Amino acid sequence: MIISASRRTDIPAYFSEWFMNRIYAGYAVVRNPLNANQLSKVYLTPDLVDCIVFWTKNPVPIIPRLDELKDFCYYFQFTLTGYDKDIERNLPDKKEVLLPAFKELADKIGPERVIWRYDPILINDRYSSDWHLETVKWLSDNLKGYTEKCVFSYVDYYKKIDKNLNSIGIKYPTDAEKKDIAIGIRDIVSANGMVATTCAENIELDGLGINHNACIDKALVERLTGGKIKNTKKNLKDAAQRPECGCMPSKEIGAHNTCSNGCIYCYANFSPDSVKKSMARYDPKSEILCDVIGPDEVVKDAADQNKLVQIDGQMSMFDFIGDD
C-alpha cells in the first residue's frame, strides 16, 4: 500500500505533529470528499505500508522528525518555483529558507528521494516564458547534486480557480510554446545532471527526450525498496486520477480546504474562508485531519490495504533502504 501525504494539502508544512501522532497510533481516518458520509480507516504500519509519498512546498517542520520514520520507505515531491507573493502568498522566502531546506532534506535522505517539482508554469506579463527559463536555470544551478529529477507542468484550467487566474492576466500557451519551454527546461536541467519529465500533460514530448512522470512512481518505489511491485493490473494505474496521470494507486490521508500556502492556482481549496474554518478544527491528536467524527458516524476499514512490494527471499524491504 502506498500512502499519499498528500495531494490535498501540505502535511509536512502544517500538520507534521498530526502525521507523526497518526504514525504512532498506526492509522488515520479519512473522509471521502465525494461522499461526506463515508469515513475510512487507513492503517499506517510498516507491515502494510510500502512507501509514503509526501507533497510539500515547505518541509522545514518535518525534517527534524524524519528519524522517527526509520521503519518506513518514503520520498518527497518538493515544489519549488520562483513565484513571488502575488502567486504563492504565504510561502517562506525561496532563497533564504526553501532552497536551504531542499538541500538539507536531500543531504538527510538522499537526492533520489527528493523530486523537484517546477509547477505549474503560469504565463502572464510578469512571468514570461523567458522568465521561467531564467528561474529554472537559477534553481537548477543551486540544486545541482541535490536531486535527480525536475518535474514540470503547465497550469490546468479548473472552474474554481478561473477567477484567480484571470486576476493575474493568465495566458494559456499553445502547444508550440509549451514545446519551446520544455526544450529549454530539458537543456538547462540536464546540464546539471537532472532528468526533465512532465506531470499529467496531454502534450507528447517523448520525441524530445521528455517523458511523462508518475508522482506515485512504480520504478522509484521498486528502487527504494529493492523489491518488485506485484504484477497485477490494478497496481499499475490509479483510476481515481486524471487520464493523463501515470500514478499507481495510493491511499490518501489528507483533506481539502486545509492548506494555508495561499497559492492562487490551488484546486484543493474552495476559498480562504473555507481554509480558515477547517484550520479552526485542527487538533494534532485527532484521528482525522481538521475534522470531527460525529457520534453516530461509522468508520470502516479502507479497501485493498495490502502490501504491493515483494522482496526475494526472507529479507525485509527495510534492509534495502539507506540510513536516514
Image (cartoon, helix red, strand yellow):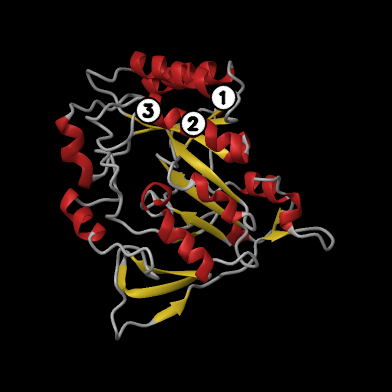
What separation in Å lies between label 3 and label 2 (alpha carbons)?
31 Å
The quarter of the rendered structure image containing the N terminus is: bottom right
Name the residue: 41% across, 16% down: 133
Mark 2, other Cα within 10 Å: few <14 / some 14–19 / many ≥20: few
Q: Which residue is denoted by mark 1 in the rendering?
A: 207
59 shown above or below 189 = below
Could you say which is closer to the camera, residue 109 or residue 113? 109
User: Would residue 72 be found to the left or right of residue 154 on screen?
Assistant: right
Which numbered mark, 1 or 3, is in the foreground of this view?
A: 3
Horizontal and vertical percent for residue 162?
19, 40
What separation in Å lies between label 1 and label 3 (alpha carbons)?
33 Å
The quarter of the rendered structure image containing the C terminus is: top right
Which mark sits nearer the N-terminus, 1 or 3? 3
Mark 3, other Cα within 10 Å: few <14 / some 14–19 / many ≥20: some
Amino acid under disc 3:
Lys
Q: Which residue is denoted by mark 3 in the rendering?
A: 94
Q: Secondary structure at mark 2?
A: loop
Q: Which residue is denoted by mark 2 in the rendering?
A: 204
Which mark sits nearer the N-terminus, 3 or 2? 3
Name the residue: 43% across, 49% down: 12
Instruction: Note whether residue 43 is visible.
Output: no
Amino acid under disc 1:
Gly
Q: Secondary structure at mark 1?
A: helix
